[in-house]
Image (cartoon, rainbow, N blue to C red):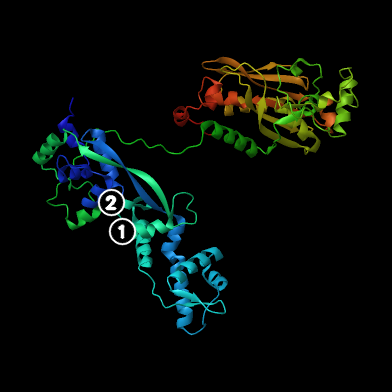
C-alpha cells in the first residue's frame, strides 16, 4: 500500500523537498553527499534523510564500513598552540634569531613551552632525523641545515578541518594521500589521551529513493513547491519588505505541538520539604540520626520492656554483622536499667524484671522515629521544640496503607507549660493543614512510653478511616532517666499517610513508583 501523496507533500520540510528535487531515481545518497551538494548545515542532512525514511520516500540500501578520525582534546590544544614540533622549532628559531642565546637544552624547552620532557624528546628526535634541529657539544638544541617538511602544513590543515567538521570526525576516504600518511602517524585506535586524533571504525548509511519518490516529485512540481519557501516571517523581512513576492511554507495548524517536558521536583520530595519548612517556621529545630540503632535507644530508653511483643523478631530487622554495639552511653544505661527494674529515681515501680545489659546492645534498623526523640532529650534545651523526618523499618505486609520501610515525622515539645492541649494543637495542624483532611478524630491509645496516649485518625475519601499516628506525654520513666524533669509532648506521625491524603493518592506504593509518567503528572501539595 502506497503513501498518501497529497498528505505527504503538505507535510514535507523544505530540507526534504530540496533533496527530492535535487536528485533522480537511482542516485545513492549519504549524509555527507547531501550536505556537501546542497550546502546544508552540519546535521541537517542526517535530519532530512531520517525524515524521508520515516515517510517512506527513501530507504536504506546498504551500510559501508569506513575509517574515521576524531579530534581529541589534545588535538584541540595542538590546533590552538601548534604541535610540539612546531612549537619547539618556533622557539629555537626565535632564540637564535634575536641573538639572545645560541641554543636551549631540552629541559629548558620543556619548561618554556609547558610540555612534558618525553614529548619534547620525541619531537626533537623526529626533527633531528630530518636535519631540521641538531644538538651541539653543550647539549643545546640548534637549528640544523634541513628545512621543515610540508608535513607540518598538512597536520595543521587536518586540525583545522576536523575542528569544523560534524562531530569533529574526518572520513579517511575523503582525505588526500598526504593527509592519510600524516594522520596515520599521529592517530591512535584506543586511549588517545596522548594523541591528537582517535581512529574509529564507523558505518556510512547509503540511501536510495523508493517508488513513491516519483509521484511525490510530480506533485511537488505541480504545486510549485521548490523547498525555498519562507518558513519564518522575521521583523527584518517586514521592515525591508523582503517578504513581497515570496512563497511561504504552509502549516498544518491541526498538528499537535511537541510536548514540553519541563523539570520539576518529585511531588513527594517537595511535600517532605514543605513539612520541614512548616515546622522550622514554627521554631522547631531539626534532628537526625543513623538508620542502625541499638535496642537501648530504639526501645529500652522508651521504657518498652524487653519482653514486650514489639521485640519479636517478626517486627524489627536485626543486623547480622556486627550483631551488637560495643557500649551504651552512661549514665543513661544505668538510669534506664534502674527504671526498668524498680523505677529508679523516677517515682515508678518499674517493670520488675532483671534488665539485660547484653540484649540492650543488639543492633537493629530503627523501627520508630521516637528513637531520635529519646536521643535528643539529654541535650535538649528547655523550653525547646524539635522534629525530624525519619526513615523507619518494620517487617510488615505491604498494602495500600502499610509499607515495610516508611517515613515518620517525629517531634517533641519540652516545657513547664506543656500539656495535652499543646499536643492536640500539633495533631490538629498535621491532620488538617498538612494532610488536608476534612474529618479528624482523636482516640485513646497505648504506648509504653507515653501517658496519656492519643491516636489521631483521618478519613480518606477512598480508603476510609485510618490511623495517622500516635502521640502522648512522655512518662517520667523516659524523661527522668534521660535527665529531663519537665513535661514533654511527643508524636510520631506517618508522613507517608499524610502525603497519601494531601497528594490525592489511593495507595502508599504510588509514592515510590518507578512510573515516571505518573510521577511527572502528579499534582503537588501547595501551601503546606
Q: Quadrant of residue 492?
A: top right
Cα separation, mark 2 vs mark 1, equals 27 Å
Q: Say the numbered circle drawn on residue 177.
A: 1
Q: Position of residue 67 (x, y in %)?
A: 35, 48
Q: Secondary structure at mark 2?
A: loop
Dot 1: what SS?
A: helix
Q: Are marks 2 and 1 in contact (CB under 8 Å)?
A: no
Instruction: Tell me residue 185's x, y (percent).
Output: 41, 58
In the picture, the disc for residue 41 is: 2
Q: Quadrant of the N terminus?
A: top left
Q: Position of residue 62 (x, y in %)?
A: 27, 37
In this view, the residue in front, 225 or 72, is 72
Whether residue 60 is visible, yes or no, is yes
**Left-right relation of 399 to 224:** right
The answer to whether any part of residue 418 appears in the image is: no
- Among numbered discs 2 and 1, the one appearing first in the sequence: 2
Residue at point 71%, 34% (across, down) = 290
Q: Nearer the viewer, residue 478 or 77?
A: 77
Is 506 placed above or below 263 here?
A: above
Say left or right for 400 vs 93: right
Q: Which residue occupies 41% across, 50% down?
A: 199
Amino acid at each position: 500500500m502506497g503513501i498518501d501523496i497529497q498528505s505527504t507533500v503538505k507535510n514535507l520540510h523544505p530540507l526534504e523537498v530540496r533533496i527530492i528535487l535535487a536528485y533522480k531515481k537511482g542516485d545513492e545518497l549519504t549524509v555527507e553527499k547531501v550536505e556537501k551538494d546542497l550546502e546544508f548545515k552540519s546535521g541537517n542532512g542526517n535530519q532530512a534523510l531520517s525524515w524521508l525514511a520515516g515517510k517512506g520516500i527513501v530507504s536504506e540500501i546498504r551500510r559501508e564500513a569506513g575509517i574515521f578520525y576524531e579530534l581529541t582534546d589534545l588535538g584541540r590544544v595542538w590546533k590552538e598552540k601548534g604541535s610540539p614540533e612546531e612549537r619547539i622549532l618556533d622557539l629555537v628559531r626565535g632564540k637564535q634569531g634575536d641573538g639572545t642565546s645560541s641554543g636551549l637544552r631540552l629541559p629548558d624547552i620543556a619548561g618554556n613551552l609547558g610540555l612534558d620532557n618525553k614529548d619534547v624528546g620525541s619531537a626533537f628526535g623526529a626533527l633531528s632525523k630530518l636535519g631540521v634541529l641538531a644538538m651541539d657539544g653543550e647539549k643545546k638544541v640548534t637549528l640544523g641545515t634541513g628545512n621543515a617538511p610540508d608535513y607540518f602544513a598538512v597536520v595543521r590543515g587536518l586540525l583545522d578541518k576536523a575542528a569544523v567538521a560534524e562531530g569533529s570526525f574526518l572520513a579517511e576516504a575523503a582525505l588526500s594521500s598526504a593527509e592519510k600518511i600524516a594522520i596515520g602517524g599521529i592517530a591512535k585506535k584506543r586511549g588517545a589521551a596522548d594523541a591528537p586524533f582517535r581512529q574509529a571504525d564507523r558505518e556510512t548509511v547509503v540511501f536510495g529513493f523508493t517508488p513513491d519518490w516519483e509521484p511525490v516529485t510530480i506533485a511537488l512540481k505541480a504545486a510549485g513547491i521548490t523547498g525555498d519557501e519562507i518558513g519564518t516571517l522575521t521583523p527584518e523581512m517586514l521592515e525591508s519588505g523582503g517578504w513581497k513576492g515570496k512563497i511561504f511554507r504552509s502549516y498544518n495548524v491541526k498538528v499537535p505541538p511537541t510536548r514540553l517536558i519541563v523539570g520539576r521536583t518529585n511531588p513527594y520530595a517537595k511535600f517532605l520539604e514543605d513539612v520541614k519548612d512548616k515546622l522550622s517556621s514554627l521554631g522547631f529545630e531539626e534532628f537526625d540520626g543513623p538508620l542502625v540503632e541499638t535496642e537501648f535507644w530504639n526501645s529500652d530508653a522508651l521504657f518498652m520492656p524487653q519482653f514486650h511483643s514489639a521485640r519479636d523478631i517478626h517486627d524489627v530487622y536485626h543486623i547480622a554483622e556486627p550483631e551488637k554495639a560495643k557500649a551504651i552511653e552512661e549514665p543513661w544505661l544505668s538510669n534506664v536499667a534502674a527504671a526498668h527494674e524498680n523505677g529508679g529515681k523516677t517515682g515508678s515501680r518499674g517493670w520488675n524484671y532483671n534488665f539485660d545489659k547484653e540484649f540492650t546492645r543488639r543492633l537493629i534498623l530503627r523501627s520508630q522515629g521516637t528513637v531520635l526523640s529519646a536521643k535528643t532529650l539529654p541535650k535538649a534545651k528547655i523550653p525547646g521544640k524539635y522534629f525530624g523526618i525519619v526513615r523507619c523499618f518494620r517487617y510488615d505486609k505491604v498494602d495500600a496503607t502499610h509499607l515495610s520501610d516508611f517515613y515518620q515525622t517525629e517531634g517533641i515539645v519540652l516545657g513547664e507549660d506543656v500539656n495535652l492541649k499543646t499536643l492536640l494543637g500539633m495533631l490538629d495542624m498535621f491532620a488538617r493543614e498538612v494532610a488536608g483532611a476534612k474529618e479528624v478524630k482523636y482516640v485513646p491509645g497505648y504506648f509504653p512510653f507515653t501517658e496519656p496516649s492519643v491516636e489521631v485518625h483521618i478519613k480518606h475519601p477512598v480508603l476510609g478511616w485510618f490511623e495517622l499516628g500516635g502521640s502522648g506525654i512522655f512518662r517520667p520513666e523516659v524523661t527522668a532517666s534521660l535527665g529531663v524533669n519537665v513535661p514533654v509532648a511527643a508524636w510520631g506521625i506517618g508522613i507517608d499517610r499524610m502525603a497519601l491524603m494531601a497528594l490525592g493518592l489511593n495507595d502508599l506504593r504510588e509514592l515510590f513508583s518507578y512510573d515516571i509518567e505518573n510521577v511527572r503528572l502528579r499534582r503537588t501539595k501547595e501551601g503546606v
